[in-house]
Image: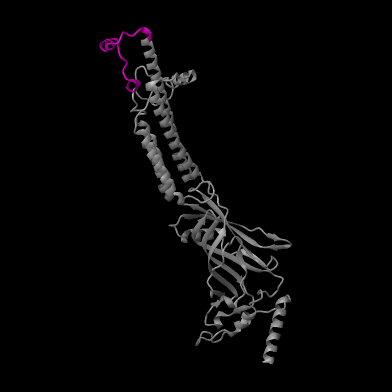
Amino acid sequence: MDRSWFRRERLYFFLVLSLLLPGRGSTFTINCTGFGQNGKYMTALDSVFERKAFRPAINFSIPTIVNISFTVSAILDVDEQLQLLSSFLWLEMVWDNPFISWNPEECEGISKISVATKNLWLPDIFITEFMDVDKTPKGLKAFISNEGRIRYKKPMKVVSICNLNIFYFPFDQQNCTLTFSSFLYTVEYISLGMENEVWEIAHTSQDIIQTHGEWELLGINKATPKKSVGTNLYDQIIFYVAIRRRPKFYIMNLLVPSSFLVTIDAFSFYLPAGSKDRAPFKITLLLGYNVFLLMMNDLLPASGTPLISVYFALCLSLMVLSLLETIFISYLLDLATTQPPPMPRWLHFLLLHCTSPRTCCPAVPQKRNTGLDHLPGMKEPMELVGKLPGPRETKLNGCPGSTRAQQEDKAQKQHLVSLWVQFSHMMDTLLFCLYLIFLATSIVTVIILWNT
């Protein structure tokens, strides 16, 4: 027992000495005569497996070059509240072990073998933005070529932090970074390189990525800056992964229903201003819009203020303003039928200016003695006030003949009623035009954001 322990300790001593002294190591030329017959094993690899705790280098002052490549096979989730990107990668690392080599002609033509990774030295390459526990399966294999090149591939579910900008939701594009670097080895010991070109990585990822998800991959770029931590300098490769959200689902479930409700509310201005059904109709639409927002709240980002939330707030404000205008007009018309208040001079001037034929108002037939374009379905002033009794009607009713002053008062009252009715028509027309401008602006904005 003591003699075997002594031999093992002496082997470890010479092994460490050969690794630490530059130029003193040597490669193992594997003699695999008879390999593959009756499952015969390359026992010469045991010497390589025993030094797996050390970086494989003949000259320890020369850094080991580790080439990196990966493939994005799926974009699983984007958490706007936690600012996290969940993706699935196939990571590939390639490096050389100078202590391994054999002649394929002596080994039954075998030029590549698979070895359990627990028997090999593995570079400690990690993703800086990684925010979860590494759940890579255990017991993976690595392929070793006859020239000593080791190729290690492993699947990874990467939950990485990403600075998300959701202002243009659901037309947003995100640019997340994946930074590959070593945790222990500085540039004197490990140098990072590319196994495949970045355009090959992007092209392969776009070909195999799942296309039925919410996100699509636009492209991948890279940068190779050095990272300085105190007096240590680390090599790293930064990949910029550009992704874009597919907006069709949100357009059909958020924007289209909202636009329909606002459009119906806009066409409610064709109901007569004095109608008793107009205010309840607008209240019903307003309640329906609030129920719609409550049901669709789960589809909106939980943090930040995206542009679509501003759109919903404007729609709701416009519908509330329309309801308040309807209540005010109903009150004004009811007041005008009993005791019409005098119209301010500035309002009278504004009314005459807006009802001028030279202004750009909707072209509808003008009524006599009103001087205002109004929406279809609006009642005339005489329908709201009623006909004034003439002299013959006053005689038939047994009333004394009205004087000229009374007739002028009645005519003035009728004129005031007509002015207030014209004012209500003007307010309806202006608000209706505001609805049309808002809807047109919303449609143009959606088209621009979708195409860009």
- Give the magenta-colored segment's residue range: 381-405
The answer to which of 194 and 342 lies nearer the viewer is 342
**Residue 17 location, quadrant:** bottom right
Q: Nearer the viewer, residue 86 or 405?
A: 405
Q: Is residue 60 visible?
A: yes
User: Is 431 rendered above or below residue 365?
Assistant: below
Q: Residue at x 40, y 47 (%)?
A: 252
User: What's the colour scheme?
Assistant: one colour
Residue 66 image point, x, y percent: 62, 67
Decide which of 296, 360 is in the foreground and name it: 296
Quarter holding the N terminus?
bottom right
Among the 4 quarters of the image, the one containing residue 121 = bottom right
Which residue is rendered at x = 40% and y = 18% of the image? Answer: 416
Q: Is residue 273 magenta?
A: no
Q: Position of residue 138 (x, y in %)?
A: 54, 74
Q: Is residue 76 above or below residue 64?
A: above
Q: Residue 101, position in %: x, y?
A: 61, 78
Classify 1 as above or below 274.
below
